[in-house]
Image (tube, helix red, strand yellow):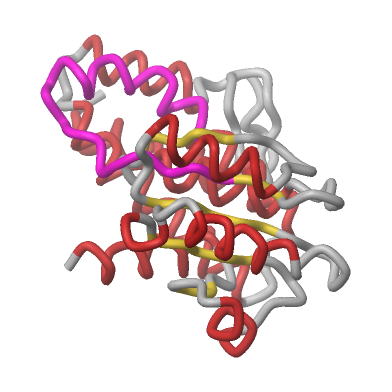
Amino acid sequence: MDKQELLEKIAFNVVQGRVEAEDEGFDPGLEGQPAVTELVEQALEQGIDPKEIVLASLTESMEQVGEKFERNEYLIPDMLASAECVGAAMDILSPHLMKAGVESKGKFVIATVSGDLHDIGKNIVAIMLKGAGYNIIDLGTDVSPERIVQAVKEHQAPYVGLSALLTTTMRVMGEVVSKLKEEGLRDQVKVLVGGAPLSDQFAKEIGADAYCKDAFHAIDSLKSMAA
């Protein structure tokens, strides 16, 4: 298989949500055919640049998935299946990218705030940012402001992402911003917030740097912050 065909095949399987050969896709008859992990390994064996695999196969395919999601052709589980493919591909590619001297775009601490156990949105954002080249420190769900601030300190992370799906827990995000101020860290950290009940207005109220309605929006916000 030539390089172009292989890169397209990886992208196709990300859109189909197929991590391994035994996985079914959205289209019938794909089971048993090589999927993302097998194809990424094959691409590396053929000497394809790992950075090219990320850009041509993973980033572009997740943009397609985002468009399908916005057109209501894909639901959250479909998007999560594709994000898992990107996560699996990045696990294989990370050591090669490091060897190739591809620098991380920075450490990104991410957490669902205390009192909230929802993690699907957070997981999608974490996987997408990993695919975009950020070093993700995922603290999980129900995380206290103290622990989030501690992680920012410990890892000297320039970015923190906070998620909440409940109106009762979104207020905790404001506590995180206050705590960063108390610790003298606020000026060194960009705070991105996301979750269904949030809005731009709420992000401004608590002093966050950006409200991100989804993973694609998060990547765009980070790009504009870095510009």
Q: Split into 4 quadrants, where in the image is the N terminus?
A: top left
Q: Is residue 92 visible?
A: yes
Q: Is residue 95 above or below residue 113?
A: above
Outermost residue toward the top in this view? 45
**220 on left or right of 25:** left
Q: Is residue 128 above or below residue 170?
A: above
Residue 50: x and y, percent? 22, 27
State the residue at coordinates (51%, 58%). 182
**73 on left or right of 38:** right
Residue 218: x and y, percent? 46, 63
**104 on left or right of 36:** left
Residue 101 in the magenta stretch? The answer is yes
State the residue at coordinates (83%, 52%). 116
Outermost residue toward the bottom in this view? 201
Q: Is residue 8 visible?
A: no
Residue 91 in the magenta stretch? The answer is yes
Outermost residue toward the left in this view? 101
Q: Which residues are magenta?
A: 87-110
Residue 47 occupies which quadrant of the picture? top left
